[in-house]
Image: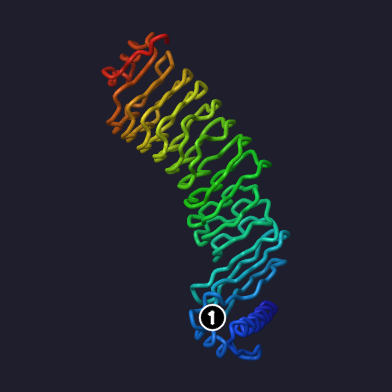
């Protein structure tokens, strides 16, 4: 009963606010009227109802917050200020109608699962410092994120915000990025800093707007799907300390044209550079031991020149260069040329091998 009573009180408050907004628009309305008479007045306003809004409401405790009831569909947005001290944010229930979305201004940090699948159109993080794990998870309804200040972001914090535009900068207080932080954020501009020491799996998967020319220099590895389908990534070399490239790490990164992989890298896994259709030239350092991942350079249709400085031929997958039909030249140390020509799976490319003099 308490819940029903509070909901009814909320409806009354909203009805009064609606009457106030109508008066602002020049339409005669009384706070004592019923919704049945107020709604037609909203719908009769010339030019539609896109600027009729509920007043700002400050959420200060857990509970269920009803945007409106009675299947009312006359508001374009609901402004909700959310305080910092909520451990588990309330459910935001949009009762009836289909077009109403909230514009949310946070008064503090975003708690875990705060807006999972909530009808939020725009979220203002101006006063936020941290987006907790899953804070905006799986919310493809968000179209705009306002975040002028650097943020700390937990695992899955922005994951699934497929349609969100805006710009997010990671705070220098955060040196590690957990799994899936920006997974599938196709339209969001993302800025990192050079003190990042680890980027976990799927972190920037399918982030199409990333156009970085270099990666944070302290990275030790690139994990599975980390930069998968980052089609505008424009790096020309990997950080010096990179030791391993895991499967699908850069697959479909068609914006990469030349790439240098330094001596510390020992392993290139399956599909790492598959479908990097802009990749023309690759140079790999002396430490490489395994290029044995399936299709690791497969379908790189522009790849013409492949240079490797390892004296001992690394293990090579039989499908490493499958469908990379433009490959014209594999350069290896001259002192190991014959070894490469007879090595397993390298031998099939013997006719395009050239020795690097002085190595």
Render colour scheme: rainbow
Q: In the displayed structure, would residue 234 be above or below residue 18? A: above
What residue is disc 1 on?
72
Q: Residues within 10 Å of mark 1 (few under 14, many from 20)?
A: some
Please identify the quadrant where the C terminus is shown. Answer: top left
Tell me where residue 12 appears, x and y as whole percent: 66, 83
* Horizontal arrangement in the rendering, residue 79 relative to residue 355 (left or right): right
Viewer-nearest residue: 128 or 265: 128
Tell me where residue 197 appears, x and y as whole percent: 61, 34
Quadrant hosting residue 124? bottom right
Tell me where residue 78 appears, x and y as whole percent: 60, 71
Q: In the displayed structure, would residue 345 be above or below residue 130? A: above
Viewer-nearest residue: 4 or 283: 283
Residue at 73 percent across and 59 percent down: it is 85
Q: In the displayed structure, would residue 95 be above or below residue 329? A: below
How many labels sit on residues? Answer: 1
* Horizontal arrangement in the rendering, residue 252 relative to residue 123 (left or right): left
Please identify the quadrant where the N terminus is shown. Answer: bottom right
Q: What element carries label 1?
A: loop
Residue at 51 percent across and 84 percent down: it is 45
Tell me where residue 208 appears, x and y as whole percent: 45, 47
* Horizontal arrangement in the rendering, residue 255 relative to residue 329 (left or right): right
Residue at 59 percent across and 85 percent down: it is 26
Q: In the displayed structure, would residue 332 be above or below residue 249? A: above
Quadrant hosting residue 325? top left
């Amino acid at each position: 009963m308490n819940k029903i009573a509070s909901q009814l009180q909320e409806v009354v408050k909203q009805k009064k606010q609606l009457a106030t907004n109508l008066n602002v628009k020049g339409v005669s309305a009384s706070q004592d009227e019923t919704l049945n008479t107020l709604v037609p007045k909203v719908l009769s306003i010339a030019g539609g109802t896109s600027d009729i809004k509920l007043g700002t409401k400050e959420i200060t405790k857990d509970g269920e917050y009803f945007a409106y009831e009675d299947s009312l569909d006359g508001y374009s947005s609901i402004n909700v200020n959310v305080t910092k001290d909520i451990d588990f944010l309330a459910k935001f229930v949009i009762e009836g109608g289909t077009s109403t979305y909230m514009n949310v201004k946070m008064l503090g940090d975003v708690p875990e699962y705060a807006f999972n699948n909530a009808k939020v159109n725009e979220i203002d993080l101006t006063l936020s410092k941290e987006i907790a794990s899953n804070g905006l998870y799986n919310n493809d309804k968000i179209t705009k994120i306002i975040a002028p200040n650097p943020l700390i972001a937990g695992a899955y914090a922005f994951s699934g915000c497929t349609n969100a535009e805006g710009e997010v900068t990671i705070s220098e207080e955060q040196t590690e990025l957990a799994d899936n932080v920006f997974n599938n954020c196709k339209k969001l501009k993302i800025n990192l800093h050079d003190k990042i020491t680890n980027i976990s799996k799927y972190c920037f998967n399918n982030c199409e707007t990333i156009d970085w020319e270099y990666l944070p220099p302290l990275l030790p590895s690139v994990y599975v799907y980390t930069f998968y389908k980052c089609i505008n990534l424009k790096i020309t070399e990997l950080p010096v300390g990179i030791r391993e490239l895991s499967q699908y790490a850069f697959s479909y990164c068609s914006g990469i044209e030349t790439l240098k992989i330094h001596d510390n890298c020992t392993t290139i896994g399956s599909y790492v550079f598959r479908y990097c259709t802009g990749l023309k030239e690759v140079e790999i350092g002396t430490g490489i031991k395994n290029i044995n991942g399936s299709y690791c350079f497969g379908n790189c249709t522009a790849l013409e020149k492949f240079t490797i400085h390892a004296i001992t031929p690394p293990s090579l997958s039989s499908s490493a260069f499958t469908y990379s039909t433009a490959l014209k030249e594999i350069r290896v140390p001259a002192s190991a040329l014959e070894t490469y020509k007879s090595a397993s799976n390298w031998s099939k490319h013997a006719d395009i091998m050239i020795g690097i003099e002085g190595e």
